Image (tube, grey):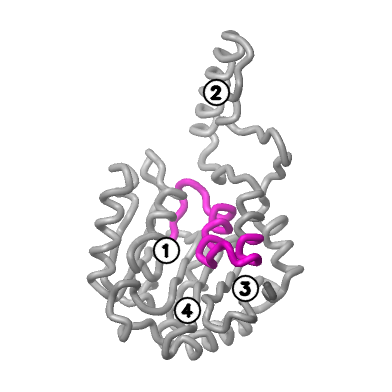
Amino acid sequence: MNSHYNCFRPFSHFIMETLTLAPFPSRGISSRYSLFRRPSSRRNFWRAQTTVSELANLEAQSGPKPIPLEISSVEEALMGFISGRRKATEVAQAVWKNVVHRGDTVIDATCGNGHDTLALVKMVADKLGKGCVYGLDIQQSAIDNTSSLLEMSTEEHERKSVQLFNVCHSKMDEIIPKENPVRLVAFNLGYLPGGDKTLITVPHTTEMALRAASKLLDSKGLISIIVYVGHPGGRDELEIVEAFTSSLPAETWVGCKFQMLNRPVAPILVLLFKK
């Protein structure tokens, strides 16, 4: 498959350096969970339990940590995308996990049926109630679908971290408190899957939303945009996204695009990282 992603060198830095992902060994990765692998004796098993308890206490004392993620998760998503086995949404979510911390504030600017909202809840919610997901959609049916999915798929403390708003994504700066630094803003542009395909995101409000997101975003944060170009108006919206990305200063932003050249209607992933 002939695949193309712009700015490959910056994206390589984006994953390996800018995101400051701690290096993991390729085999025998050590995490709090791997401590329970094949205990050789009762003493080792007791020590594993004690170590996990100590790590939990340290985490509680020192504040939120990046969610542990094997680098292979990103590599597999990227290689799966290149070989046509993974969706752009899977690549996006794999990258999110390298940016987002427990307790962060994030925005799902286009809730749709709630799958991105659910993924973000699982990344940021903690039992201390610090994590927050703001979910926006202009269609009430999308908000209802998202709410139903969260009700079925999350625990009570996770649901408390979500606030859903039936409002256009261009209004996010009127909803999100200015004092809350935002780590991630996710866009899934186009129409609501399973809904009315004539109701779509449009270039004008999407441009407004991108500008609002860029101002709300904290340093080391990410704007993630999936653009669906296989419907009327999709190409126009892509032009707006690309023009906005091109206008961002290279000194403070890194912009990357993933696009299948021989699949002209395949979704396109754009990632904007704020240094």
Residue type marked 1: Ile
Circle nearer the N terminus (4, 2) = 2
Residue 63 in the image: state x and y as whole percent.
51, 39
**1 or 2: tag closer to the N-terminus:** 2
Boundaries of the magenta span: 78-106
Q: Secondary structure at mark 3?
A: strand
Q: Which residue has dot 1 on it? A: 107
Task: Identify the image quadrant of the N terminus.
Answer: bottom right
**Residue drawn at 40 percent across, 52 percent down:** 121
Of residues 63 and 69, the one nearer the viewer is 69
Q: Which mark is residue 258?
A: 3
In the picture of the structure, the residue carrying the numbered disc 2 is: 54
What whole-number distance in Å separates the C-alpha atoms at marks 4 and 2? 46 Å
Q: CA distance from mark 1 to mark 2?
A: 33 Å
Q: Amino acid at mark 4?
A: Tyr
Question: As displayed, is residue 176 above or below residue 237?
Answer: above
Residue shown at 58% from the left, 58% from the top: 95
Under circle 1, the secondary element is strand
